[in-house]
Amino acid sequence: MNTFQKSKIIMIALFFLTTVAKSQTITEKIDEVMQRYTELDQFSGTVLLAKDGKVLYTKAFGDANKSFGIKNKIDTKFNIASMGKMFTGVSIFQLHERGTLDVNAPVITYLKNFPLGDKITIYHLLSHTSGLGNYMRHPDYRADRIAFKKIDDLLPIIYEQEVQFETPGERFSYSNSGMIILGAIIEKLTGQSYSDYITKNIFEPTKMYDTEMRFGDEVVQNRATGYMRSISGKFHNNYSKSSTPSADGGILSTVGDIFKFDQALYSPILINNVSKEKMFTALKITYGLAFQVEERQGNKVVGHSGGAPGISSYFSRYLKDKYTIIVLSNYDRIARNIAYYIEYILYGKKYELPRPTLNQFLYANRDKTDSLGSLQDVNDFIKKDYSIDHPQYLNIAAYEFMNESEVHFAIKLFKLNVQLFPKEANVYDSLGEAYERNEQYDLALKNYEKAVEVATEHAHRSLHSFKATLERFKKERSKDM
């Protein structure tokens, strides 16, 4: 063996050692983060990381069913929530490529009884710029979710709701109702149920055999039960809060099957490159057509997230570097955090290990917080450890305390939220709700009125909802007088 050959062998050996070492470092760092999340009991689910189509990391954590002590496994099926919107978008572009429909055509072209005008196009529905709202807020749906098992069952309540704005394309407003309309179009044009269509045209071609549309009352092997954790640490399953799977989400899948979908999007097996270019182009905000689209770490990152009570999911595809991150969880509000930790590890960004959530911190320190004299003192105490840069953080915590019947403390947190975010209409509405619960009706009225005033001033998309709450409150109070 000559010197050149020896050098070549050494270089190859060093290359593989370096690659393995780097892979182990990434794995160890992810394990460290996941171990911390597990210790805090903030995550339950499955995680997958891949590069160039090869899996680098995949593990399961937590319980699929706490009542029976059944652990999550890699092939556990999770409700992926709004991640299912990607399947609806791909289906629409399949029909577009076949000449069955035109994505720029008005909805009324395909649904003749569509009552919301002839200006809303399929494109507007795909991009969430149609102005349609969320059928899940309709009182009939809230009263009996299980009654709405078919897309046709949902259309009447969608048609009853007011549009969020009059001019389609004017702005972004995330709409579950819009995706249901797309599902109705798919069924109308193909003569198949939405479930049958996506099974035959997406799941079967990609061999996603563990992905399916199943109702909450059906027996499904390897299905994870969704869990919500109260601020005091108690877990409750999400059976009473589960929505019917449909064109806007709620499908069951595994990290392995979502990875198959990811890889299929790099080939023409589902849709062609022209369709993908359209879907993967951000429009009004970080959203394209049925896919979320962001610029991060020097990559165009496409995919989708999902969330509901007891459910969270996150799927990211880094198109330049060919990374794939998939997180499916049967806990809510956590999958995105896991995915971002993995991203930071991959790209060498600084991060701190997970710690107790703001909710957990507030519950553990509620006596200390409640004893502080002013709202500014409360704010200063919280800011030592936690940044409150969005009104949702305190709102979620305050509602948790309301659920634990600690209304007095909830009111303190809602009042702090009003002080921190005086231009946010929802903080006044929430404070009004707390005062109403506490039978402080004058203060409730004052804050409900303020919510409408602020929403009107800032053209808030939920203005009609705040008005409805105010009218409901006035009507109920007039009966009691």
Image (cartoon, rainbow, N blue to C red):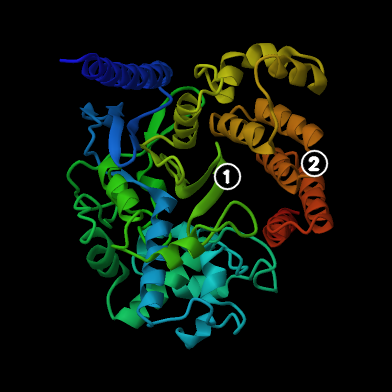
Whether residue 127 appears in this view of the structure is: yes
Kind of residue at disc 1: Glu
Q: The disc labelled 2 sits on which kind of residue?
A: Leu
Is residue 74 left or right of 271 when viewed as pictured? left
Give the residue displayed 55% in from the left and 77% down from the top.
121
* Residue 63 percent location from the top left of the image: 28, 29
x, y percent for residue 283: 61, 60
* SS of the residue under disc 2: helix
241 or 16: nearer the eye? 16
Q: Nearer the viewer, residue 290 or 444?
A: 290
Q: Based on the displayed image, in which of its 4 quarters is residue 367 positioned?
A: top right
Image coords of residue 139 (percent x, y): 53, 62
Q: Which residue is mark 2?
A: 443
Instruction: Using the image, determine if residue 51 lies above or below residue 87.
Output: above
Front-most of 135 and 184? 184
- The tag on residue 295 is 1
Residue 179, horizontal then vertical, whole percent: 47, 65
Determine whether 255 is above or below 70 in the image. Answer: below
